[in-house]
Image (cartoon, helix red, strand yellow):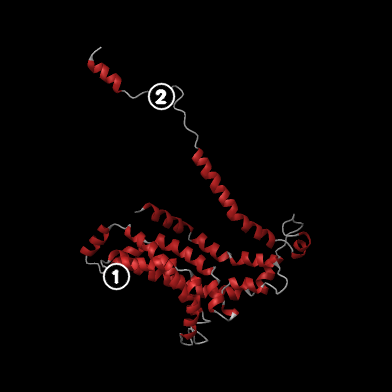
Amino acid sequence: MTTDTLTRRTSRPEQPAAGGPRKPKPWGQIASQVFLISASVLWLLPIAFALYVALRPYSETRKYGYVSMPHSFTLKNFSEAWTQSDMLHFFWNSVMITVPAVIIVLALASGVAFVLTRVNSRLNIALLILFTAGNLLPQQVIITPLYRIYLKITLPHFLSSSGLMYNSIFGLVTINVAFQLGFCVFVLSNYMKSIPGEMYEAALVDGATLWTRFWKLTIPLCRPALAALATLLTTWIYNDFFWAITLMSSGDKRPVTSALANLQGQFVSNQNLIAAAAMIAAIPTLVVYILLQKQFIAGLSLGSSKG
């Protein structure tokens, strides 16, 4: 046997056994699937129970209890919740608060994030830390000084019927913009950093101005991230009730979340009616998520894969 033949035989990879290598059991995958299924069930269980309560007559739950087998279902709670709470009026209030706040936050955050990532300045890191640190401040900490400030800031009559920041929709839009801006700047700045710098260099060679590089180059590439943030902001601002009860005294100016409080009596609360109203109030955020679902998932996946 020659040396070359021995070398060729020893260099051959070992052939697998006749039955092939035995694959290990994917215990990690099984555990992760069980965890995700359990988390999904726990997440959906309160919603399913609220829908179950909303479909049952109040007389039945008062007699048998909320945790009992149903004897009948009805949609009467939804119609009564819509009329008794004046839901349409409060829906409009929420639209007047949520839509301007989301648009202003995304416009300001995209501009600030572009400057922090694409304009060389010694203050960029400090400003980014400042915007990020604002998210760490609890809302309850500043409520007393903010309440006094709102009572002293005057506004034109077309922005506030009371002439003050307090008890005005403009005041709620302003505070929501202030608290959501830092998070959006942080997310968009990280997303814009993932855009290749060669694109901006080529645009600069072609004579593109700073505004052109921002509006025609950066914003189209950031549409998935903007859609994801728009979905989150709509949900957060629409569901907010803390600022409404703190910075507003007129109940008819408050958002739709306050309509649920209007259904509670002083001594007896019809939980079936409240559950039905809660289901109705959740419809707009669900519609927004369905409309922006593809962009929302694309924004999350692209933001996690680029670095």
The quadrant holding residue 86 is: bottom right
Which callout, 1 or 2, points to the residue nearer the camera?
Answer: 2
Residue 272 in percent (x, y) is at: 70, 65
Residue 300 in percent (x, y) is at: 43, 56
Marking on residue 211 = 1
- Left or right? Give the position of 161 relative to 7: right
Query: Residue 41, relative to residue 286: is it above or below?
Result: above
The local secondary structure at tag 2 comes to loop
Q: Which residue is mark 2?
A: 16
Query: Residue 17, relative to residue 101: is it above or below?
Result: above
Residue 40 in percent (x, y) is at: 57, 51
First along the sequence among labels 1 and 2: 2
Report the Cα–Cα distance between label 1 and label 2.
Answer: 62 Å
The residue type indicated by label 2 comes to: Pro
The residue sitting at the right extreme is 63
Q: Residue at left 42%, top 70%? A: 105
Q: How packed is label 1: few (under 14 Cα within 10 Å), some, or many (20 or more)?
A: few
